[in-house]
Image (cartoon, helix red, strand yellow):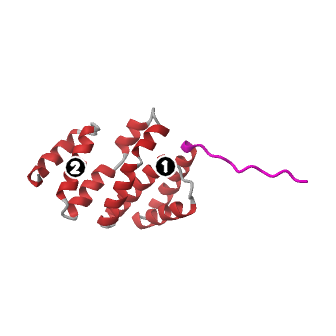
Amino acid sequence: MAKRQEPVRKSVKDVLEDLLAGHREAAFSGPESALKYLRRTFEGQASLPNAVKAVAYDLAADAQAQSGQWEDCAASVDTALGYLPDLEAAFPHEYRRMLEGMTCFERGIQAHSEQGDFHAALELCERAIALDLGAHYKAKRDSLEWAR
């Protein structure tokens, strides 16, 4: 009787590397192609680790912003931000670098501003400032101060 092969279990880091490699390749053809790749990834991988979902939704928000899909972009930003604790837990030593490389705060502020939801944009500025992601978020906050 043949021995059943166990499925290959990839680490969270390996899954993330696969996602980034696939996204890089798809993004060469533009944001629509990148979104198509990400949609297929979400549909095809029901067990995608939450830490990887944080990065995937960040990538989706960036592509949606490039395509002017502001509602979808704002939703992807909210989803990505919801997975940040999982990202930190899975990558405690790399979390800060990864967080600084994410575009979800920038894209979220842009998306909310495009939709006229300046309070939500201001909240994202405050959150980015609290995470010490850069002085430019203070400038953005100051420019949105009138929305209080």
Q: Amino acid at mark 2?
A: Glu
Residue 95 in the figure: left or right of residue 74: right
Residue position marked by numbered label 1 in the rendering: 50
Does the image show residue 29?
Answer: no
Query: Is residue 8 visible to us here?
Result: yes
Asked whether 130 or 101 is in front, the reply is 130
Taking 85 as reference, is 40 above or below it?
below
Q: Which residues are magenta?
A: 1-13
- The picture places residue 124, in percent across and down from the top left corner, at 25, 49
Q: Amino acid at mark 1?
A: Asn
Q: Which residue is mark 2?
A: 123
Question: Magenta stretch: residue 10 in it?
Answer: yes
- In the orientation shown, which residue stands out farthest toward the right? 1
Q: Residues within 10 Å of mark 2 (few under 14, many from 20)?
A: some
User: Compared with residue 30, is residue 87 higher up or lower down, i.e. above or below?
Assistant: above
Quadrant the N terminus occupies: bottom right
Q: Residue furthest top?
A: 93
Determine whether the residue tagged by mark 2 lies in a helix, strand or loop: helix
Taking 29 as reference, is 73 left or right? Answer: left
Front one among 125 and 17? 125
